[in-house]
Image: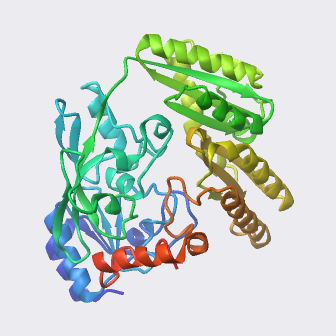
Amino acid sequence: MLKTSLIAALEKIVGKENLLASREALRVYSYDATTNWEHEPDVVVFPSSANEISLSLKLANREKIPVTPRGGGTNASGGSIPINGGILLCTTKMNKILKIDKENLCAVVEPGLILQDLTLRLARDGLFFPPDPQSFLGATLGGILAENGGGPACLKYGVTKQYVLGIEVVLPTGEIVSLGGRTLNVVGYDLLRIIVGSEGTLGVITKAELKLRRVPSARKTMMAVYADVAVAGENVSRILENGVVPYKIELLDNWVINRIEEISPMGLPKDADAVLLFEVDGETEAVEKEMEKIVEITQHYGATDVRVAKDQAEADAYWMARRAGFAAAHSRMPTQFSEDVAVPRGNMPALIKKVKEICEKYNVENCILGHTGDGNLHPAVLTDVKDKEHYGRAMKAVDEIIEAVVELNGVISGEHGIGLEKKKYFNSVTDPVVVNMMKGVKTLFDPNNIMNPGKIWN
């Protein structure tokens, strides 16, 4: 519990209207969008500038108060849970687009800006920011940078780190520093890319200069239907080895398909074991040729049906189904382990089969979604935390799924981060020398360990 004098000092920094300490408010900021972790902060502050964040962190560092950065709270790893109490520092009021430079294809934004708001603004100038996590309707840029967000488009365009030119960041000790810049050249150590993806453990990003792209002149969507989800997984490699790199390749298994059709019928094939959604983009002629090639390959390698969207409305319906996948799973059971793993693309069929075998072994319901183009799968294990016996079986299933991922030369997180959710696995799958190097970096940036403590490693 923070002293009254410290809360008063924070109130003086951010203003009375930007500080919350009621029981109701602390409860609201005690959890995130998808995990089962909960812990209340002692106070919630909403800074409106880098200077206010600097003053808040100087106070926290001096008094050794834990600080947890938070944006929209859409993260899926427990990274924004104030597990040690202290100050929850919410950046949602720093939500401006400071500059759009069409000539140099870049934009300067604040961390509280919602990705969808940026996307809509950029569209007016025929531009877009490629990283597209599925939480884009509520995810903020600060969180996306902190987690190095990916999403369906990362197959062709890459992840967030590849689109950050520069950042302004407040260190845990309160210093405001700028890293990177307009060009891609780096002098000395690339500290910018240590901060991006560090899950809010090394500082608070207060401004970012992002690289943009021009919106392609054409896009086309297709759905391929499969009688076997593992065959669908194999098809991904078949497409890519033939030299076609789609904008997106997404997978929905039979469970997800039928659950979506129960909630909001979209005409998905309920008897399919899985579907793959493809989208290609580029110049019109190239898009037509790439789509023809994908149709040919999928038909040759096991697709039972191929449906090229006849118009944008049909394409939007397919992608709406993909975005509805997690909602469908969450509405089925009170508790869900939404895993986020990645394996080499050639090992996806083996992982899919293994997930099904493990869940059958423990008699727990599961479903699989994924950004299959880059081997990033989201197997979800459904349970109820109030049913201790069932919950215990579900946890064992998740443990074995993680073991299978490692055996298949995969990684335990493809885009959600480690946070609290995966830290029990982190040390066992990471070289101890590397863990110690990371801890050394953490100590250099944050000597008093106040910034998002308790995350990533035990």
Q: Is residue 371 left or right of residue 117?
A: right
Vertical placement of residue 254 versus 159, above or below = above
Q: Nearer the viewer, residue 439 or 418?
A: 439
Q: Is residue 46 left or right of residue 160?
A: left
In the image, what residue occupies the spot 72% across and 50% down?
351
Q: Position of residue 119 (x, y in %)?
A: 33, 35
Residue 410: quarter of image: bottom right
Q: Position of residue 429 (x, y in %)?
A: 60, 69
Residue 73: quarter of image: bottom left
Q: Position of residue 186 (x, y in %)?
A: 23, 54
Q: Nearer the viewer, residue 97 or 236?
A: 236
Residue 228: quarter of image: top right
Q: Position of residue 72 (x, y in %)?
A: 38, 55
User: Where is the N terminus found, in terms of image quarters?
Assistant: bottom left
In the image, what residue occupies the spot 28% across and 59% down?
190
Q: Nearer the viewer, residue 226 or 6?
A: 226
Q: Is residue 320 left or right of residue 102?
A: right
In the image, what residue occupies the spot 77% across and 25% down?
302
